[in-house]
Amino acid sequence: METFSEQPEPDIVKISVLHEESIIVGFHLTDYWIKDLISNFPASTYVIITDTNIASIYLEKLSNRFESELNRAKKSNVPVPRFLTYSIPPGEQSKSREIKGEIEDYLLSKACTRDTCIIAFGGGVIGDLVGFVAATFMRGVPFIQVPTTLLAMVDSSIGGKTAVDTPHGKNLIGSFWQPKRIYIDIIYLETLPERQFINGMAEVIKTAAISDESDFVNLENGVESIRNAVLKPKKEFPFQGTKIETRTSGQSLLLSVIVGSAKFKAHVVTHDERESGLRSLLNFGHTIGHAIEAILSPELLHGECISVGMIKEVELARSMGHLNQVAVGRLLRCLSNYGLPVSLDEKKVLDLTGEKFCTVDKLMDIMKVDKKNRGDLKRIVILSGIGKTYEQNATWVSDSAIRKVLSPSIIVHPNVISSSSQTHVNMTTPGSKSISNRALVLAALGKGTCRLKGLLHSDDTQVMLNALIDLEGAKFEWEDDGETLVVNGGGGNLKVPNKEIYLGNAGTASRFITTLCTLISPETITDTNKHTIVTGNARMKQRPIGPLITALRENGSQIKYLETEGCLPVEILPNKQRFRGGSINLAASISSQYVTSILLSAPYANEPVTLKLTGGQVISQPYIDMTIAMMESFGIKVERLEGDVYRIPQGFYKNPEVYVIESDASSATYPLAIAAITGITCTLPNIGSSSLQGDAAFAVNVLRAMGCTVTQTSTSTTVKGPPIGKLKPLPEIDMETMTDAFLTASVLAAVANNQEGGSKECITRITGIANQQLKECNRISAMIDELTKFGVKASELSDGIQVYGIQVHGTRIESLKGPAEGVHCYDDHRVAMSFSVLGCVVPDGTIICDKKCVEKTWPSWWDVLESKFGFNLDGLDLKSQREDLLTHKDISVSSDNFQDFSIVFIGMRGAGKTSLGKACAKALGRKFIDMDDHFETVLSTTLPEFIKTQGWDAFRTKESELLASLLKTHSTGCIISCGGGIVETESSRDLLKKFTKEKGKVIHITRDIEEIIKYLNEDTVRPSYEENIHDVWKRREEWYKECSNYEYHLLTAEKVNNDNIDPSEWKLIQRDFFRYLKFITGQTVNNIDTLNKTKSFFVSLTYPNISPSLKDIPIITQGVDAIELRVDLLVQSDSQKFEDLDYISYVSHQLALIRRSSTLPIIFTVRSKGQGGKFPDSREKDMFKLLEYAVKWGCEYIDLEIGSSEDLILNLIKNKGYSKIIASWHDISGKMKWNSEEARNRYKIAEKYGDIIKLISKAESINDNLKLQEFIQTLSSKNSKSIIAINMGTEGQLSRVLNQFLTPVTHSLLPSKAAPGQLSVCEIHQALHLIGQLPKKKYYIFGTPISHSMSPTLHNAGFKVLGLPHFYDIFESKDVSAVKPIIEDPEFGGASVTIPHKINIIPYLDEISEHAKAIGAVNTIITKTDENNKRKLIGDNTDWLGIFHSIKDLIEIDSNTSALIIGAGGTSRAALHAVNQLGVNNIYLYNRTLENANILVKEFPTYGIQPLTSLSNSLPISPKIIISTIPATVANLDIPDELFNSGKGGVSVEMAYKPRRTKFLEKSESMGWHGIEGIRVLIEQGIFQFEKWTGRRAPKELMEEEVMKKYNL
Ligand SMILES: NC(=O)c1ccc[n+]([C@@H]2O[C@H](COP(=O)([O-])OP(=O)(O)OC[C@H]3O[C@@H](n4cnc5c(N)ncnc54)[C@H](O)[C@@H]3O)[C@@H](O)[C@H]2O)c1
Ligand SMILES: [Zn+2]
């Protein structure tokens, strides 16, 4: 081979596009392309435009070459052309009109003319942007593409599409402009970041998948060498690859792949330059992929979204019957082997996208806007095979088919029409997983080539295959459309892999691979690869592998558990001993896979192996027999001796030329069971009586016994079921030899019918399946739980399950009902498939959640149900429904069940865990478990007793064990309160940490340590500490923090116990804690209402310590919507250290103080010095630690400085939970101008990271405020995020006046302004009024008699304190028509309406709100201007809101709660509506004239109202709520004692407010009820009026105070 030190003339490939050979591909082309360009495209100026990333790597060298070539080529008489370069910031943000303008300005400033040649040197961003510049500059100048990313090489540089993005969408402005040349120098890929390379591979794989199977095969087989050629190029000498003969095989392959892809794109472009038919094929994966991208960009890259899109689109093709599973599996594996995601549930995707998720509704919505749609049809490229499409262009596909594929869950509808006894289904089932897995290992270990046919294509076998590839144990290649796997056996030479072997949840692989890893020889150790780590997903890490490891260790292998004893992950150290062999003892009563694992590797041990199985009964003997039989097919004969002893000779497996894998017998049970349950006939040609698999006996031993007709040959099976409902129960069936089939049998047993009837029981008892408790999930309890949901009775046996046939209970199949929340599948394919069998006869359909879990063994199962058996399936996305739920504000706590993961409380003893735990368990409808009580119950002892006799260590160990089992058995639906010392042991800490990782919540309850000490000194019940409590706290504090993902600071000086604590304080504690829980579980996110508010404000607290000023908080927060805690301004002491836990506790305490005095949402801000705050700029990590705490503390808003390090930012965003991010930029220098590129870039960055954008600059003149307004109008289009944009300084005050959303405000009581120029709410309103933005309005009360009304006092007080210019007056009239001129006055702002006009005002109004309609009365008039600027009068009702909110927090309401309403006038209507809205279903209504009561009963037919004739009798359900709506002056009613029969804690509401105390109230309170005075309700409803009128938060405390002052006169 020739080598070069000088660069030789390169070998190139030319590709023609649009009939010109303008694409040139090769390696090391720099010199070549510069020459080619200069000689073929003479110009006066050459301009290279690139991005700064690329410039920093290549530009200097490139410029030198270019200039010297220009000089060299100089022609006499002609001046040397100019050479210019220009770099722009990298990234998609640069593809903008602004940057385009910037480039154009540059070109113009350099006096570039029409004979300029522009070179786009970079990725797709540069290509698209620079192409567009070239297209329009001087009406178009020549342009050259030098692509440097893979995506650009194979896709974006070819075709002449150019574009820029706008805030309205990507690529919306652009043109077609063909480059004169495209120079593809593959060498540039060597510096491309790995993720960008993988991103480009998506398009390469896409092209092969639609165009050329042989290209695809190259990709499949070339993963390693293509990846290495780019990511780890081996360079033996400079310029390697320039000439064909010097190319590595990887380089050649890479070149051919790129050429193949580019050629196809060029071909399509040539034949179809403007979008249509052929070109639409390139859209494969893009219809769905783009929708995903719209949601998940920028977290996911284009290619990554397309990769998932392709998978969804081939699944669609498969479900339409155009594509087989082999092809789907091949594409899936190919994509994932290159490192692309194939599902949005993958860990790496979730890590990147955090809380963002794609609901099906969202995806469908986005696809809906595509202009190419036709009604309910969308265009999607449908494959018919690898390299082939179903049509010559995209295919029309229905929305419902797409929805089905996208949905995570599925509904199975029974098929009434085609399942008749005549129906005969003939089908083959997937290959056996057990046989496939064994065959893979055998052939890999063997010598020679073996063709495996009928191999199962599944996650499990893929995991096994990947592990074997990782170990470099053999070479694999696919043939015949993927039907055949060619294995080139490596003869047992395995290498230490260069990464962890990750096995997902594939149990078989975990067992087989572990032993295999002990065969690795120490010679293969390298500096970086020293040992083998075998690991899996969370569930895998709970599955046992202990007995196998023990046996291997005893045999000399060095294996270490890395997390939990007895489970993966393990680390295996290669050593001389390797797998020593000789005599091995193995406990085989848990899994036969241990035995198989040792058997398979045994021939390669250092000595012949004698394997002795111990531990009693050997489980699943047939699987062991299968292994032995298969080993024999590969040339090794195992000898079975007496008493479970096996002797395995040493040797190599000899690979047979071909090995055919039989159908999976467990999978075969499902179609056969469908025949059994529906009465049809089903034949499977690939499994019969000669099968080695235990489950193959299912047809004969189970189905025949249940009443089916079964015919079997040695290789085929046919089952015909009895008519529906005629299956018989199996009183006793031992399924030990076919344990996996027990789930199938259980669902059949559920519909079994004991034909003899009478006294005979109808129970199926399945035994011999104890091992099923340790499978993907505890399958026995899973089956019991899920069957129960259908109303089927089932229970556990010591080693099995018993199922009661539904028909004997007098129920019939027709009345079976699937669970509304769906069948939970526990990520277990067998649970899913079994219940889909049952679903075949459930009349209203059965929801199976998480349909994807069948992919483990039968990815096309759902398609088979439809296409083979004719069932109808629908897609369902429970997450979409959950999102809908979340957008409704104020969902009551008890209705929540979607986030029912148990919540664990930890913290010091005495912190309040038990009291809070009990209270919140009650409120959330959960079960409360106190670990200490649990301990005492389980061990039948007391803690002091146990500790006295066994000691602390034994206690801690036991405690940890109990925690482990509790977290397993009670992982949902509970509140678990742990003992204070739970964090003392590492094992418990690990358990807690693991729980938080699996999305469980562990809340650390903190409380001031001095308070705790005070409390503990009084406590004598619990075992006392033997050490100082301060020391205990010091030791544990860090542990508590690392074990918890949430933290709540309990603020009280009292002993926390609802019997001791002052009830009013306890109420405040509960209120705050429930708010906290509702927030962190996402039930009520307490966000600022942006819909009904025209303006909102937040006040910045600038105190160093809030404590002394707490009393001011209600005043300071008047009219504001949120409170900003400026953490950087807090001062605990002069010497505070930001990294100290003491400081964190101080912040947490301050937060708790604010929470105690206000329920407003909190904005948590740590402002750095550089951004105008006090937090040291050098302490970025500490800043983010605080922000992470803000999430733990449940702060509603968190301020994030966008100038911080990106990894910190992304990490925060990923973990932000329900907190919203305010992405902020404060330019305190004032250099940032609003019309500059900088401002736009800051905006874009803030938009990327934040839920809310906050940009602050400084005004030098009033003009800067106008520029700011312009900026906002151009950038924030309709659907973009809320923005806070302000200029600091006095000159900037106008911007504060005009800002709409969350304007920061100050208050005169605060120690200082948070920023220069800050105004108060009152000042802002006054200013708005003066500049004509807030005209004065008049408000009234209409009715009579109203001269003593409190309303004017109430509202005018509110207007005044907020600085609103409005006035509220009385307008008294008997005749409603008198109000007409008033409400027509343009100054009219709104009115309160009272007796006697509440009903007859209605005809004067334009619209009536829903609630007012329901009530049939109006008490509030609101004015609104519609989109045509026409003023509208809207009638609303706030009376009911006043009643509703007065009661809501005082009482819990369930289906047995009843309420009594007294009186049947206008107010009574509001009272009825209020209790109805509270959820009360039993309402008694009493009125002196029964007729009037009856009228209301008729008017509110759905409210469950029962009229009463008298009040003297006690009622069937004693009311817990009584509302009196009769004027106190008319009848000061005496209510009989019996009405208070429901006991203490009821609520009485008096609607009359003159006099203040009525007999009714006095009586109620003497009976231990809460009495609500009429004046309170009046104020409450008035507050709602005020807020509806002004769009501002009412200064409630003050308004109330003013009214009470006057009222008490
Ligand atoms: N015109 C078309 O037909 C077409 C087709 C597909 C995509 N596109 C467009 O292409 C754009 C995406 O292109 P992209 O994926 O190439 O992104 P890109 O241009 O942003 O490049 C990706 C990143 O890699 C860096 N980079 C590029 N080459 C490098 C190298 N050789 N070494 C080191 N770093 C390098 C860049 O600086 C950038 O940070 C999108 O805007 C998309 O709309 C256009
Ligand atoms: Zn694309």
Image: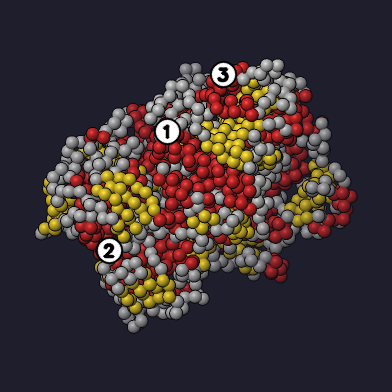
Residue that numbered label 2 is attached to: 693
Report the front residue among 1215 and 508: 508
Q: Looking at the image, which residue sits at the far left?
A: 642
In percent of the image, x 20 and y 55: which residue is there?
A: 635
Residue 1325 on image: x %, y %: 75, 33
Report the front residue among 395 and 898: 395
Give the residue type that dot 2 points to: Gln
Q: CA distance from mark 3 to mark 1?
A: 29 Å
Report the front residue among 246 and 1560: 246
Mark number displayed over residue 64: 3
Mark number displayed over residue 245: 1
Which element is circle 2 on? Answer: loop
Q: Quadrant of residue 1501?
A: bottom right
Quarter of the image with the C terminus in it: top right
Tell which tag, 3 or 1, sits nearer the viewer: 1
Q: Is mark 2 within 8 Å of ligand 2?
A: no
Which element is circle 3 on? Answer: helix
Q: Is mark 1 within 8 Å of ligand 1?
A: no
Q: CA distance from mark 1 to mark 2?
A: 53 Å
Circle nearer the N terminus (3, 1): 3
Horizontal side, residue 257 vs residue 1556: left or right: left
